[in-house]
């Protein structure tokens, strides 16, 4: 009997997080993720399970830090000051909290069945902005000069998730454009469209329809835009985001970020090497000048007669004797 997941939904827990495995049709992605925020991750083929662990660990730390701040404010004073609780009661309270947190996970990781594509779906009514979470992760990696992900390559936020049809995409993009790109502002923008196993929409059609929604005061800049409209269509769903951080954060690509670290280290090494060579040259020049001065002094000393060779002037008595 083969253990393939073809028609049934299979739910597992990985690192304390709910992970759902299966293909897109069995999970019903069009109804499963619609009207919810999330983040899409891309990784190499065959490395999805390891990438799920990375995602659960990194995002778990992000959401746990936010929860700790909220919990500290919600705890009443009598419970903070009560220190006479026994160890067994404290253990029971902690176990209860862990169970409640496991039931109310802030996010779920969905293995979509597409090779190298994972989706993190946010749960709850009040969820943070996915673009702010992704940009904060890249800012921390730039600050610490250390990559938080080894398997994940691209990280794309999804502020709105809708069906992968031109009507739904235009409707969702119109709401975001009116919110983030007001009229009468002279700034630049660009549209980034990515498609994976989706033949229901065409690239040129999507870009033309969304560009027509943007006000004429905005100009197109493909290299260094102020705003980037990200559109990622995957089978039957499409995620849309309007981000001001996409270009500054290396297009949300971890490999490009790591490459920039290596290039900066090489430039530092080159500057250090050039400084060393310049210091060596200065030392050589000083030694050569010292050698020249020593040679000149030696030549001057050779021209002068030695004390032993200096003859005394003859006296008058000696001259008369001669």
Image (spheres, rainbow, N blue to C red):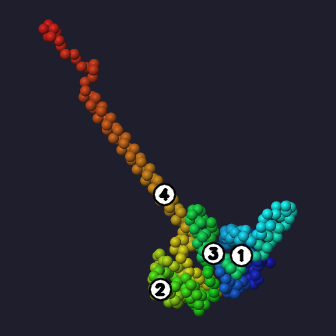
The N terminus, quarter of image: bottom right
The residue carrying pointer 2 sits among few (fewer than 14), some (14 to 19) or many (20 or more) residues within 10 Å by Cα, namely few
Q: Quadrant of residue 32?
A: bottom right
Could you tell whether 110 is left or right of 138 in the image?
Answer: right
Q: Which residue is mark 1?
A: 106
Position of residue 215 measured from the top left corner of the image (x, y, whole percent): 48, 87
Q: Residue at x 61, y 88 (%)?
A: 164
Q: Could you tell me how far apart the alpha carbons at marks 2 and 4 are, in whole angstroms?
A: 44 Å
| Residue 151 vs residue 62, the one in the foreground | 62
Numbered disc in front, either 4 or 1: 1
Q: Please state the horizontal and vertical placement of residue 129, each as a whole percent of the image.
A: 62, 77
* Up-down relation of residue 61 to residue 211 (above or below): above
Q: Of helix, strand and loop, which one carries label 1?
A: loop
- Check disc 1: other Cα within 10 Å, few if <14, some if 14-19, many if 20+: some
**Circle on res. 184:** 2
- Distance of mark 4 from mark 1, alpha carbons? 42 Å
Q: Are marks 2 and 1 in contact (CB under 8 Å)?
A: no
Q: Residues within 10 Å of mark 3 (few under 14, many from 20)?
A: many
Q: Say whether disc 4 or disc 3 marks the residue closer to the N-terminus.
A: 3
Disc 3 target residue: 41
């Amino acid at each position: 009997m083969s253990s393939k997941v073809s028609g049934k939904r299979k739910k597992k827990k990985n690192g304390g997080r709910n992970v759902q495995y299966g293909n897109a049709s069995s999970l019903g992605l069009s109804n499963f993720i619609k009207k919810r925020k999330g983040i899409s991750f891309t990784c190499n083929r065959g490395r999805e399970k390891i990438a799920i662990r990375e995602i659960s660990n990194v995002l778990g730390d992000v959401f746990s830090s936010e929860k700790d701040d909220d919990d500290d404010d919600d705890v009443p004073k009598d419970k903070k000051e009560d220190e006479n609780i026994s160890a067994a009661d404290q253990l029971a309270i902690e176990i209860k909290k862990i169970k409640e947190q496991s039931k109310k996970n802030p996010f779920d990781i969905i293995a979509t069945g597409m090779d190298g594509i994972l989706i993190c779906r946010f749960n709850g009514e009040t969820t943070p902005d996915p673009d702010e979470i992704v940009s904060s992760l890249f800012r921390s990696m730039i600050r610490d000069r250390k990559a938080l992900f080894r398997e994940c390559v691209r990280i794309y936020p999804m502020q709105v998730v809708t069906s992968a049809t031109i009507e739904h995409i235009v409707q969702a993009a119109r709401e975001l454009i009116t919110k983030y790109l007001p009229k009468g502002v002279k700034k630049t923008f660009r549209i980034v469209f990515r498609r994976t196993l989706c033949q229901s929409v065409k690239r040129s059609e999507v870009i033309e329809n969304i560009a027509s929604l943007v006000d004429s005061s905005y100009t197109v800049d493909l290299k260094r835009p102020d705003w980037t409209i990200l559109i990622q269509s995957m089978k039957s769903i499409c995620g849309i985001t309007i981000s001001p951080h996409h270009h500054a954060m290396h297009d949300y690509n971890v490999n490009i970020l790591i490459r920039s670290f290596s290039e900066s280290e090489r430039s530092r090494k080159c500057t250090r090497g050039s400084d060393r060579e310049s210091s060596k040259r200065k030392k050589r020049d000083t030694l050569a000048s010292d050698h020249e001065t020593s040679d000149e002094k030696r030549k001057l000393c050779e021209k002068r007669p030695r004390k032993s060779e200096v003859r005394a002037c003859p006296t008058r008595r000696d001259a008369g004797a001669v």
